Image (cartoon, grey):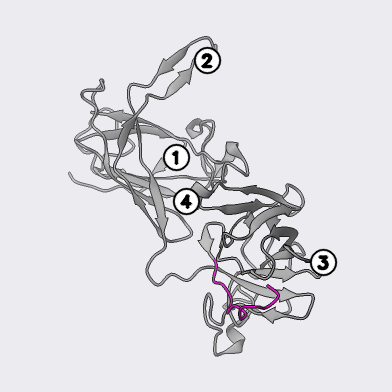
């Protein structure tokens, strides 16, 4: 008998897949859940959780996992923060019991063809598994350290799909009256039928676009406002992050800013960290807990986060930020002012 049994998984987060080297099976799993059981007809007494040659496992929220299937550090719903924001929330863990895999470092073979997919779209390209130093484990009595039989590492890098448009755009303004809006159709084009846009009253009607109708149709608008107190070599900006989506809630947002080499980040009245030059000379900013940490849906009264940052550079040689990233996505820059303007 050949059959396929599919598990019902609601609200999955990331999905991690691989191909077994031989005929390994997943006997059981805690902290995540396999999406397919596959053909387990050759097993009579105990039925594995997954018998497919290329399993895929999904991360769920804690609410969707029974207590017996949870472990410490699991069930993040596919949301992982950076280590800057919260090291405890930057790791997701799960454990699997594997059958027919061998019991020594000489008989265990590394899985191959790793894949990673996330709910937000886009693809990840994953490297081959490479054996590294054995992982160390502290015993429950915390008196001795044991080593894993084998530890390997796989690195996956994000690559947006072809034709992908970012969910965010950047605009400029100043105390002197400068206004440079987001590029037209930066995320999508405005519908020709105005009735298909989300109503400006704040009421979401069935069939309406959840994003407020704008020339750029981006769910996230990041505005750089040049303040008049900017003098000499120091520029002060008020940065506003606005959520224009009536449905989405952006919790624990993170902003990455790459400025020209002649400018140096000085300060911000929100959380920030400047990466060293070997990591891209980027400034990382994120919200303060219980203050501007989350962006609620448009109309919620908490859909905008504002903070002030300052840069120092050579007078007369100022340029706008070359790249701005919101939650990992590169935002579309506006049509830049001509050289010699106040930015």
Q: Are marks 3 and 1 in contact (CB under 8 Å)?
A: no
The answer to which quarter of the image holds residue 44 is: top left
Counting residues from the start of the chain, the first of labels 2 and 1 encountered is 1
Q: Mark 2 or mark 1, which is nearer to you?
A: 2
Q: Please report the residue visible at 71 percent of the width from the left and 65 percent of the height from the top.
A: 240
SS for dot 4: loop
Counting residues from the start of the chain, the first of labels 2 and 3 encountered is 2
Residue range corresponding to the magenta coloring: 331-343
Q: Label 2 vs label 1: CA separation?
A: 23 Å
Residue 168 place in picture, x, y as percent: 57, 68
Q: Are marks 2 and 3 in contact (CB under 8 Å)?
A: no
Counting residues from the start of the chain, the first of labels 4 and 3 encountered is 4
Q: Label 2 vs label 3: CA separation?
A: 58 Å
Question: Which disc number belongs to residue 140?
Answer: 2
Q: Mark 4 or mark 3, which is nearer to you?
A: 3
Residue at far top of view: 143
The answer to which quarter of the image holds residue 316 is: bottom right
Residue at numbered disc 1: 32
Q: Label 2 vs label 4: CA separation?
A: 32 Å
Residue 75 place in picture, x, y as percent: 52, 41
Residue at numbered disc 4: 12
Residue 164 place in picture, x, y as percent: 43, 69
Residue at numbered disc 3: 229
Q: Label 4 vs label 3: CA separation?
A: 48 Å
Q: Tell me if mark 4 has few (under 14), some (14-19) or many (20+) residues whose alpha carbon lies within 10 angstroms of its own.
A: many
């Amino acid at each position: 008998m050949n059959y396929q049994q599919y598990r019902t998984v609601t609200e999955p987060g990331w999905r991690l897949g691989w191909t077994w080297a031989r005929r390994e099976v997943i006997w059981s799993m805690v902290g995540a859940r396999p999406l397919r059981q596959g053909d387990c007809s050759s097993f009579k007494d105990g039925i594995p959780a997954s018998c497919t040659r290329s399993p895929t496992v999904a991360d769920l929220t804690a609410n969707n996992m029974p207590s017996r299937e949870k472990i410490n550090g699991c069930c993040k719903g596919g949301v992982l923060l950076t280590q800057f924001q919260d090291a405890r929330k930057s790791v997701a863990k799960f454990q699997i019991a594997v059958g027919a895999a061998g019991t020594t470092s000489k008989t265990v073979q590394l899985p191959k063809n790793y894949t990673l997919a996330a709910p937000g779209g886009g693809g990840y390209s994953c490297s081959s598994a490479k054996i590294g130093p054995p992982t160390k484990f502290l015993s429950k009595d915390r008196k001795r350290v044991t080593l894993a039989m084998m530890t390997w590492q796989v690195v996956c890098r994000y690559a947006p799909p072809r034709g992908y448009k970012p969910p965010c755009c950047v605009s400029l303004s100043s105390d002197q009256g400068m206004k440079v809006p987001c590029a037209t159709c930066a995320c999508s084009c405005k519908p020709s039928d105005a009735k298909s846009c989300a109503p400006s009253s704040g009421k979401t009607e069935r069939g309406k676009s959840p994003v407020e109708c704008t020339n750029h149709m981006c769910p996230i608008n990041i505005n750089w406002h040049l303040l008049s107190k900017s003098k000499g070599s120091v520029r002060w900006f008020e940065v506003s992050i606005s959520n224009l989506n009536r449905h989405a809630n952006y919790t624990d947002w993170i902003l990455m800013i790459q400025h020209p080499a002649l400018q140096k980040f000085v300060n911000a009245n929100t959380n920030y960290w400047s990466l060293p030059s070997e990591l891209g000379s980027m400034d990382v900013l994120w919200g303060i807990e219980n203050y501007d940490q989350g962006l609620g849906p448009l109309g919620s009264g908490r859909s905008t986060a504002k903070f002030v940052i300052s840069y120092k550079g050579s007078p007369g040689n100022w340029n706008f930020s070359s790249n701005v990233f919101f939650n990992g996505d590169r935002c579309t820059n506006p049509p830049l002012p001509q050289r010699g303007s106040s930015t």
